[in-house]
Amino acid sequence: MSPSAGTLRVAVLAGGRSSEHEVSLSSAAAVRDGLIEAGHETVWVELARDGSWCVDGRPIDVTPGGGLLDADVVFGALHGPFGEDGSVQGLLEMLDVPYVGAGVPASAVCIDKVLFKRLMATAGMPQVAYVGLSAERWQAHPDAALAEIESLGLPVFVKPAHLGSSVGISKASSAQELRRAIGSAFEYDELVIVEAASTGLEVECGVLGVLGSERAQAFASEPGEITFASEFYDYDAKYAPEGMGLLVPARISPAAREQVMALALATFELVRCDGLARVDFFVEGEEVLVNELNTMPGFTPTSVYAKLLDASGVGYTELVDRLCRLALARHRELAGYRR
Ligand SMILES: Nc1ncnc2c1ncn2[C@@H]1O[C@H](COP(=O)(O)OP(=O)(O)O)[C@@H](O)[C@H]1O
Ligand SMILES: [Mg+2]
């Protein structure tokens, strides 16, 4: 496709400070290629692990209200803390530049597995039982915490509250494993979540915002089923070659499929997400439980999100283009309010 009047200058943010730095580099490189394919101009902004932002190896300066590198829109292909958690989104708000995806509150809520589950509970959304555990509580009242966790039964999943890519997650099947799992999750985070284990299939659904409609309105993709040989969908399963498979459509009943798609949209709206999301589920027969909403899922053409959208008729080039247009539309819309 050749550049046209609709050509945008897009700053692609890559890397970042989280443990998902490398994953982000892959997502961002694919986004850049897709944007070029769509006829846009790109600026590669590399966010180093130390927090600096560089273009062509040189650190950049930013000024509040001054935009970012003359970009029309920013595509932050960043995963995890300091990227997908509202912090970069807040900075981009202060620079007053349109950016792809969720804003500050949705990003912040969805990166926090405890806050997310609490919000879901207020709306009666189906999910596993859980216990949120702060480092202070674990230190001050471990026995009371363990008594509460006992009500979840065994096995349980123990996770750092703010990470992704399964980093720091373990499955515990005994009291001894539980203590070890909690200790290891606290190496990553000051907040840990312990969850009852679901035995369901893992099913994921992509959500894409719809231009020209209400902000929160969106489209749900065909759900896909994740397959893996490991005990759960851990880091290696996610990133090792052949570690996982994706079945589209998922091997679930028509009613469960409808339910997954409806809950994906309901979750997207409940957290007031924007642009895109991948909503992940456990499907136990006819029962569908929401696991999490990722505001910036892995984003290469072979990532689950892109494959689900592709299976639903939106190819990768069109996808990255539409996300930029949605970002521009949202920025214009929000600029119209007297705040
Ligand atoms: N409550 C649970 N029941 C069963 N499996 C779980 C549960 N929580 C997590 N898992 C397993 O761990 C994986 C990663 O957990 P998840 O909450 O999705 O964290 P991440 O944000 O790192 O992807 C899931 O895809 C699933 O395989
Ligand atoms: Mg997950």
Image (cartoon, rainbow, N blue to C red):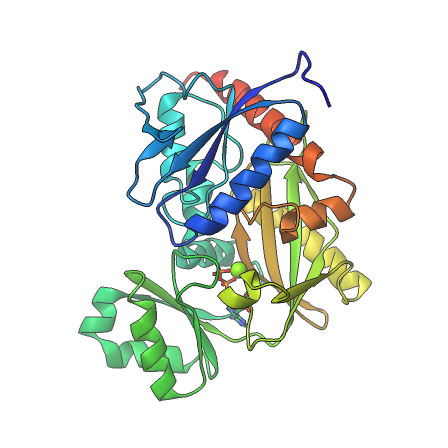
* Residue 295 in view: no
Q: In the image, 329: left or right of 172?
A: right
Residue under the point 64% across and 65% down: 242
Front residue of this view, candidates 65 and 316: 316
Q: Where residue 106 sits: x, y (%)?
A: 47, 42
Against 46, is 18 above or below?
below
Residue furthest left in the image? 140
Q: In the image, 110: left or right of 310?
A: left
Front residue of this view, candidates 43 and 291: 43
Front residue of this view, candidates 128 and 242: 242
All told, the count of numbered labels is 0
Residue under the point 59% across and 58% down: 280
The quarter of the image holding the N terminus is: top right
Residue furthest front in the image? 57
Against 99, is 256 above or below?
below
Residue 38 appears in which quarter of the rendering? top right
Q: In the image, 186: left or right of 201?
A: left
Q: Where residue 221 sits: x, y (%)?
A: 72, 48
Q: Where residue 329 sits: x, y (%)?
A: 58, 22
Residue under the point 72% across and 55% down: 223
* Residue 183 in view: yes
Against 327, is 226 above or below?
below
The quarter of the image holding the C terminus is: top left
Residue 83 appears in which quarter of the rendering? top left
Residue under the point 77% across and 48% down: 311
Against 300, is 38 above or below?
above
Residue furthest top in the image? 5
Q: Where residue 230 sits: x, y (%)?
A: 57, 75
